[in-house]
């Protein structure tokens, strides 16, 4: 009988930490992983863009690889590994991707190249960008969310890519609604369809410079948005020391 106890305990606490868009920001990632370690999260799921923009791609690959049960490929990861042409990237993003190609280790490159932009886990759809276009589409409007719900067989979907913490929902027979989500906000995801974005660990763009992530509780049917303060000056200094564009260092401090 005693032998069944641990699995029962595990089944009762099915919490998952969802991270995305780390972008080579080791300072932010380390702080978030420490924060996750203080929760009951059993698994870490990463929605991609481990590298690009930031100065520590190798450390970020090693940390995400060790910590995550599943990791998607983001457009920046694919740009670095050659899965996407850098012609489709903005000037700054292409420059950072080329820099990353120069410094990335062989093993780190091989792991990045093995990732896919979409996955399903625990009945939840994981897409780097959107269920319609897992690589490029930014789901930032209710109209787009409607189209995503139509394209998504699962009730719950996770997306990153926009670097904005948000939730869209649609109840049976009703129109979709959606909102940006601030720290500490929780959504009851036990009914209806949901599209959840954890925000970005390494380059938040919703005006809050703290690293953003999401704690899912699949047993309770809830999602809660978290923010973790980190050494922004350290991450910015690393970007400047790597001679990456100064704007990539500057924006971290504003969360833009
Ligand atoms: Zn990204």
Image (cartoon, grey):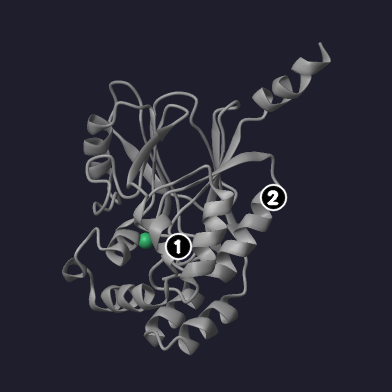
Residue of label 1: 108
What residue do we see at 62% from left, 63% from top? 30
212 displayed left or right of 193 = right
Toward the left, the furthest residue is 87
- The x, y position of residue 42, in whole percent, is 63, 38
Residue 177, image x and y in percent? 34, 38
Q: For residue 8, which quarter of the picture?
A: top right
Total number of numbered labels? 2
The residue under label 2 is: 37
Residue 189 appears anywhere in the view? yes
Asked whether mark 1 and ligand 1 are closer than 8 Å, the reply comes as no
Q: Which secondary structure lies at badge 1?
A: helix
Q: Which mark is residue 73?
A: none
Q: Is residue 216 placed above or below 252 in the rendered structure?
A: above
Quarter occupied by residue 218:
top right
Q: Quadrant of the C terminus?
A: bottom left
Q: Residues within 10 Å of mark 1 (few under 14, many from 20)?
A: some
The residue closer to the viewer here, 103 or 213, is: 103
Image spot of residue 206 (x, y percent): 43, 63
- Residue 114 lies, with reference to residue 131, above or below; the image says below
Q: Residue at x 22, y 43 (%)?
A: 143
Tags 2 and 1 in contact by the CB under 8 Å rule? no
Q: Earlier in the sequence, mark 2 or mark 1?
A: 2
């Amino acid at each position: 009988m005693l032998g069944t106890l641990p699995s029962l305990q595990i089944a009762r606490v099915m919490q998952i930490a969802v991270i995305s868009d780390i972008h080579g920001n080791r300072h932010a990632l380390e702080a978030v992983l420490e924060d996750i370690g203080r929760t009951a999260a059993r698994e870490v799921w990463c929605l991609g863009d481990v590298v690009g923009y930031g100065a520590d791609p190798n450390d970020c690959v090693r940390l995400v690889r060790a910590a995550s049960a599943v990791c998607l490929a983001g457009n920046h990861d694919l740009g670095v590994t050659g899965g996407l042409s850098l012609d489709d990237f903005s000037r700054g993003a292409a420059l950072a991707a080329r820099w990353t190609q120069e410094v990335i280790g062989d093993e780190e490159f091989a792991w990045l190249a093995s990732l896919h932009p979409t996955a399903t886990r625990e009945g939840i759809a994981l897409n780097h960008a959107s269920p319609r276009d897992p690589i490029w589409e930014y789901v930032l409007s209710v109209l787009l969310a409607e189209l995503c719900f139509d394209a998504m067989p699962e009730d719950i979907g996770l997306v990153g890519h926009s670097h904005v913490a948000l939730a869209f929902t649609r109840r049976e027979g009703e129109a979709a609604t959606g909102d940006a989500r601030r720290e500490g906000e929780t959504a009851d995801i036990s009914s209806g369809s949901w599209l959840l974005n954890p925000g970005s660990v390494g380059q938040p763009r919703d005006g809050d410079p703290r690293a953003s992530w999401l704690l899912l509780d699949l047993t309770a049917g809830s999602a809660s948005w978290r923010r973790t303060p980190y050494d922004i000056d350290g991450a910015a200094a690393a970007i400047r020391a790597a001679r990456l564009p100064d704007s990539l260092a500057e924006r971290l401090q504003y969360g833009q």
